[in-house]
Amino acid sequence: MALTPRLDLRQVQTLVMTPQLQQAIKLLQLSNLELADYLDEELEKNPLLQQEDQSSGAEDESQNPEIQEPDLNGSPDTEVDHTGFEDGFDTSDITDLIGTKT
């Protein structure tokens, strides 16, 4: 029997159920009422947890003037700024590429 060098490679994949993953699975299975009860219990158990006011988040977003809702209706009243497009814009290069003439 001759001894020959050999190299073996094994790859194993396992799923680790971390406590955080177990908690997430548990919470996702709860109904809205059960989730509210669970949160109330956790707030009572842990004095460092605080319940955030739900209406304060909506007010903060509405008071931010930088965020504007896009006009999804496409109303004809909306003016589009075409500055810079009317001067020196030649469509002949584009028409040559696609093979059509306007």
Image (spheres, rainbow, N blue to C red):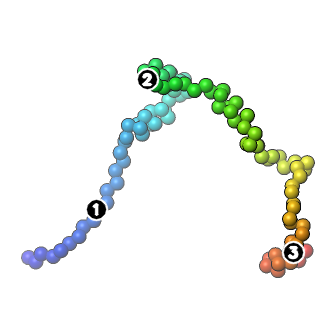
> Looking at the rendering, in which quadrant would you find the N terminus?
bottom left
The disc, 3 or 2, on the residue closer to the chain's N-terminal end is 2
Locate residue 28 relative to residue 67 in the image: left or right. Answer: left
Q: Position of residue 66 (x, y in %)?
A: 74, 43
- On the question of residue 89 being in view, the answer is yes
Q: Residue furthest top?
A: 44
Residue at 87 percent across and 74 percent down: it is: 90
Locate residue 70 relative to residue 26 in the image: left or right. Answer: right
The disc, 2 or 1, on the residue closer to the chain's N-terminal end is 1
Q: For the residue marked with disc 2, what is the amino acid? A: Asn
* Inter-mark Cα distance, 3 to 2: 68 Å
* Inter-mark Cα distance, 3 to 1: 62 Å
Residue at 82 percent across and 78 percent down: it is: 93
Q: Secondary structure at mark 3?
A: loop
Marks 2 and 1 in Cβ contact (< 8 Å): no
Q: Badge 1: few (under 14), some or many (20 or more) residues near its Cα, within 10 Å? A: few
Q: Secondary structure at mark 2?
A: loop
Q: Which residue is mark 3?
A: 90
Q: Which residue is mark 1?
A: 10
Up the image or down, 41 lies above or below 58; here it is above
Q: Which residue is mark 2?
A: 46
Q: Position of residue 44 (x, y in %)?
A: 46, 19
Residue at 91 percent across and 48 percent down: it is: 77
- Residue 6: name its quadrant: bottom left
Which of 2 and 23 lies nearest the eye of the viewer? Answer: 23
Q: For the residue marked with disc 3, what is the amino acid? A: Asp
Residue at 37 percent across and 42 percent down: it is: 17
Which of 17 and 61 lies nearest the eye of the viewer? Answer: 61
Q: Position of residue 88 (x, y in %)?
A: 88, 72
